[in-house]
Amino acid sequence: MIDIILYHNMKLLIFTEGSTNIGFGHLTRCIALYQQFEQIGYTPKLIIYGDKSIQSLIANLHYTVVNWFDASALENYLSKQIDIAIIDSYLADKNTYGKIVHSAKLTVYIDDNNRIRYPKGIVVNGNMYANLLNYNKEHEQIFLLGSPYTILRDKFLNTPKKNVRKEIKHILITFGGDDIRNMTPKVLSALNTQYPDIKKTAIIGAGFRHAKQLLRYQGNNTQCVFSPNVSEIKKLMINADIAISGGGQTLYELARTGTPTLVITIAGNQIHNIKELTKQGITIYTGIWHDKNIGEKIIDSISFLNSQEKRKKISTLAQQCIDGKGAKRVATEIVSYYISRSKIS
């Protein structure tokens, strides 16, 4: 058991990013870690490069919104030694990483695609394809890789086994907090035409640029849910028979709830994720966002999932692969490693 009392004053900073332009995946993942650190007795501070669209996500947390990529701004947080620094970023350069490493006793890197050659510390990649990446494993590095370390928000920890209905009666549409490719109206248009009698629910995040335009798709069987909290999102996933989603971190939340998912590639950095989850039989690859025939492919994929047995198989496999305990494992191993090093030194 971690000796919480001895290290209760530990300084723990989490550096990340989130905005309408860059998405919310990194921030959401860091909030999940933040929650787990709190549960084992520590209160981190989030240092976020972001905009006003993230306010609903970080309410009641200990945070600062600042451009920490700026050297002078970063120095304000590095002037006093940090016990543990966690970095989850696609934007930070090697120089920024180096400055943080120099000021922290232990540095942790949340990674997705082996983005850079990380300095000493702990590398965390909870994606299912993580072990396939060619990490250069050096001395003084620890690697936490694969689905046991998939970081999900704490609401997804206790999730019931999926109730797989005989027929598809409810389809969930979710393209993250911003829907950068404006896919939601395209999907709703195709579904309303082909399946007017099936219930459709679209999650509309805080970063959507064309949110008001989506109101015209609402009807007796189509609902738009604006900026739902994590409990509401989980409930929507549980109640849906299938989902249509982009290829980001949301796929793991859908897997945890056992929701068979049609996945559409929204960005190049999602390709590894989509390929591996499709290979493992957890998702159905449907196409790329700019495909002119994406609507037809969505309808074809839904037809493939009409079979209750197929959906049961996918649902069971998905919930077996993603158990929801990844954030707790990551937080516990980080603190345990820090304490063991401190006792040696």
Image (spheres, helix red, strand yellow):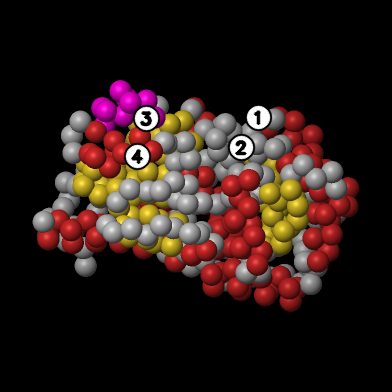
Which residue lies at the image location 23% right of the left edge and 43% below the top edge? 104
Q: Report the amino acid beneath label 4.
A: Tyr
Examine the rendered structure and indicate whether residue 244 appears above or below residue 58: below
Q: Are marks 1 and 3 in contact (CB under 8 Å)?
A: no
Q: Label 3 to label 4, Cα distance in Å?
A: 11 Å
Q: Which residue is mark 4?
A: 97
Q: Are marks 3 and 2 in contact (CB under 8 Å)?
A: no
**Magenta stretch in the rendered image:** 68-77
Residue 209 image label: 1
Q: Report the amino acid beneath label 1.
A: Arg
- Binning the other alpha carbons within 10 Å of mark 2 as few (below 14), some (14 to 19) or many (20 upward) gives many
Q: Which residue is mark 3?
A: 68
Q: Position of residue 176 (x, y in %)?
A: 60, 44
Magenta region, main secondary structure: helix
Earlier sequence position, callout 3 versus callout 2: 3
Instruction: Identify the secondary structure beneath mark 1.
Output: loop
Earlier sequence position, callout 4 versus callout 2: 4
Q: Are marks 4 and 2 in contact (CB under 8 Å)?
A: no
